[in-house]
Amino acid sequence: MSKLVSFVIPVYNEEESLLALYAALIGVAKKFKEDSEFILINDGSQDRTAEMLQELREKDPRIKYINLSRNFGHQAAITAGMDLCRGDAVIIMDADLQDPPEVVLEMLDRWREGYQVVHAKRTQRKGESIFKKMTAHLFYRLLDVMTPVKIPLDSGDFRLVDRAPLNAFLKLREHDRFVRGMFAWGGFRSTEVEFERDERRAGETKYSFSKMMNLGLSAILSFSDTPLRIIVQLGALMSIFSFFYAGFIFVKAVFFDVYQSGWPTIVTLILFLSGIQLAVIGVVGLYIGRIHQETKGRPLYLVNEAVGFDHTDQPQRAFVATWKD
Ligand code: UDP
Ligand code: MG
């Protein structure tokens, strides 16, 4: 039997990209011998995305789609798609064609050679603001020094994953999701292919600044305890410093008979220390907030409708309100 390749594509207000995306998908699917299914996850879009998905499904049964009950974010959306897909390999890509579909052919070649995870590394990013390029560049390097797991530099979530690492990944149900890091953590036989990231075909980025910040924070907090280590070191340094400073004042007073009322020093120290303390409590709070979120054990996303999936033997990973054919 022919193998099945699942495309997992999150869509959030992508009415302008959907038709071009579909055309590109069937174009590329013709060029490899495996069967394909296209799983589109509607992440709570407010535009015509949902209707268009329905129309596409009526035209082509390889299209399957999931309507989440609200916007759960890109990382949760791709997890939903991976949960429900059936492929022997899954390909995660964006809906806006910034991840060029031809790269998929190269990924499939690597997969047939025996690689289990093939991620795509961006050599260039076209049509993105200097600000986004710079923050992304810095972020990947910062993350690299902070995490013990080697997370590939300059790679987004565009990748091919074989069924074995995929099943392993599906066991990881943490809420604080940084999917590319989770795959890196998983190991398996991995390789990369290079590509130039195209401009977004239509519409605007759906990754707002706050969504980017949250993703960055999730990455750091869930893969690194460096911030906690830094504050421990900071605290230790400051107490050593204050110990010497006290000695210095003591020696000055006893042996040289010099002592001043010292208001400015005290005020400065209080401000400095209380600032540091607030920052330290804040960092600890961030980690505790994550623990709080994890302990509730809520599902990562809720599915309102799953259309086109065989639901007779679905593993009970997701809450699905309705299954439709
Ligand atoms: N996306 C999503 N939910 C969100 C934000 C984005 O499903 O809350 C999808 C979006 O439709 C696209 C992919 O995630 O398919 C990447 O988003 P985008 O292209 O806006 O990010 P960028 O390429 O600008 O980083
Ligand atoms: Mg994009």
Image: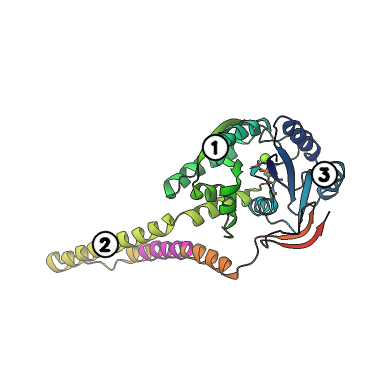
Q: Is 40 one of the magenta-colored residues?
A: no
- The quadrant in which residue 324 appears is bottom right
In this rendering, the label closer to the viewer, 3 or 1: 1
Q: Residue furthest front?
A: 1
Q: Which residue is mark 1?
A: 114
76 to the left or right of 321: left
Check disc 3: other Cα within 10 Å, few if <14, some if 14-19, many if 20+: few
Does the CB distance between marks 3 and 2 fall below 8 Å? Answer: no
Q: Which residue is mark 2?
A: 240
Query: Does the residue tagged 3 have its C-beta within 8 Å of any atom of ligand 1?
Result: no
For image coordinates 73% across by 40% down, the residue present is: 36
Of helix, strand and loop, which one carries label 1? loop
Q: Which residue is mark 3?
A: 61
Query: From mark 3 to mark 2, how far is it between C-alphas?
Result: 69 Å
Lower sequence index among marks 3 and 1: 3
Query: Does the residue tagged 1 have its C-beta within 8 Å of any atom of ligand 1?
Result: no
Of helix, strand and loop, which one carries label 3? loop
Residue 283 or residue 102, whichever sits in front: 102
Regarding ligand 2, which quadrant of the image does it lie in?
top right
Q: Amino acid at mark 3?
A: Pro
In this rendering, the label closer to the viewer, 1 or 2: 1
Does any portion of residue 283 appear in the rendered image? yes
Query: From mark 3 to mark 1, how far is it between C-alphas?
Result: 29 Å
Lower sequence index among marks 1 and 2: 1
28 to the left or right of 56: left
Extent of the magenta region: 269-283
Residue 322 or residue 254, whichever sits in front: 322
Q: Position of residue 1 (x, y in %)?
A: 70, 41
For image coordinates 56% across by 47% down, the residue present is: 180
Q: Amino acid at mark 1?
A: Gly
Lower sequence index among marks 3 and 2: 3
Of helix, strand and loop, which one carries label 2? helix
